[in-house]
Amino acid sequence: MKFNYTATNKEGKTIQGAIEAPDHQTALANISKQGLHPIIVQIEKSKGTGKAKGKKVKTKELVIFTRQLSTMVSAGVPITRSLATLENQTQTKNFKSVIAAVAKEVEGGISLGVAMSKYPNVFSDVYVNMVRAGEAGGILDEILKRLATQVEGEATIRKKIKGAMMYPLVISVIAVVAFFFIMILIIPKISKILNDLGGPNARLPIYTRVLLTISSFVQHNALFIVVGVGLFIFLFRRFAKSTKGRYQIHAMMLRLPILKGIVIKIAIARFARTFASLMSAGVGVLDALEVTGGAIGNKVIEAELKEAAKEVKNGKALSEPISQSKHFPPIVAQMLAIGEETGQIDTILIKVADFYEEEVDTVIDSLASIIEPIMIVGLGSVVGVIAASVMGPIASLSKNIGSQ
């Protein structure tokens, strides 16, 4: 199999390349034999095979699999037998085929971590690197327990965020549908009533004229509006998937007042827990920073970590570049410095992760309680404006007719 690597030569220059090797350890050894100092060595993902590679697995299934594999490994059951047992217990066809493929690779002499790395949509970089570290340190069962807890925690945060966003999303969709329904079907009938009461030259309030103009525009251009919105969504999704687009969107998220705080807290919690888990598993600082950056979920903060990794590579402690970050609060750098002094980075960062995860829970719960009344007031205001635009002129024209 093929490994991509980043290494330094005797002159300290960073170089990148690829090497063929049967497993990760052999790749490291072969790179070192070339007089290079390996920094990052990863299997080339594009070489992964298997029909299930492109399909994701439910978080609940991955957590159960990880916990059960941890229990079996700690009980002394061989990896191949453990995987075969879990394959038989798994109900999902997709995940079953992945486990079977991983078991076959392990039977062929490949390490568990390398076999899992062939399925990046099932086992993330963080997952794979921690498994590799657990195998190298002989603590795979302990690492798998930590992984299960970490995956479960990430899923809980995502579930809370989705739950908080569901209400405004549903209300927004209903509001858009109601808007088109009113503009296309209701307002034209009201316009006819106004014309019948006051004639085509009736003097109407400006907000009523604006409402009638919007209704007329929507009626005559409904198809173009729908196509335009669909095209905008399509182009936006393509832009969001590009490297440049994802970076710009993540940068914008860090500038929005309320969203900024949530995004930063989630990123710090992910950084602290993932980096602590990798360090405790024996992964090197540079490798841990590389993997952690990809797991944070924000390209801007990931770029900051890459810059921090360069300074660490030049001999600085990690707490120094983190203290100069625009997005990491000072307390994170201070806690890192304490961890570096005491040699307990993993323990201290776990406490940081717990703190920020509690902060995220509190902010999301508060946000969910605030969104509902804001949406109600907003929709009520729109309904009030439409009602005033319609009922006021009708009442006025009816009164004028009655007085004549």
Image (spheres, helix red, strand yellow):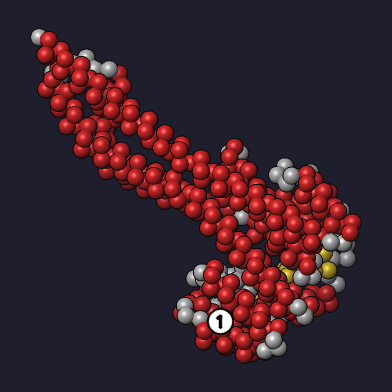
Q: Secondary structure at mark 1?
A: helix
Residue 350 seen in the current view = yes
**Closer-to-camera residue (363/90):** 363
Q: Quadrant of the N terminus?
A: bottom right
Q: Is residue 24 visible?
A: no
Label 1 is placed on what type of residue?
Ile
Residue 62 location (% of width, % of height): 57, 72
Q: Is residue 302 above or below residue 277?
A: above
Which residue appears at 71% of the width and 78% of the height? 141
Residue under the image location 30 percent in, 41 percent down: 178
From the viewer's side, name the closer residue of 180 and 6.
180
Above or below, 395 relative to 294: above
Q: Is residue 370 left or right of residue 81?
A: left
At horizontal 75% and vertical 74% (from top left) the residue drawn is 133
Position in image of residue 97 (x %, y %): 51, 81
Q: Quadrant of residue 40?
A: bottom right
Q: Which residue is mark 1?
A: 99
Which picture quadrant has residue 203? top left
Residue, far left: 404
Q: Which image quarter is the C terminus in?
A: top left
Which residue is at a point 26% across and 35% down the rendered structure image? 183
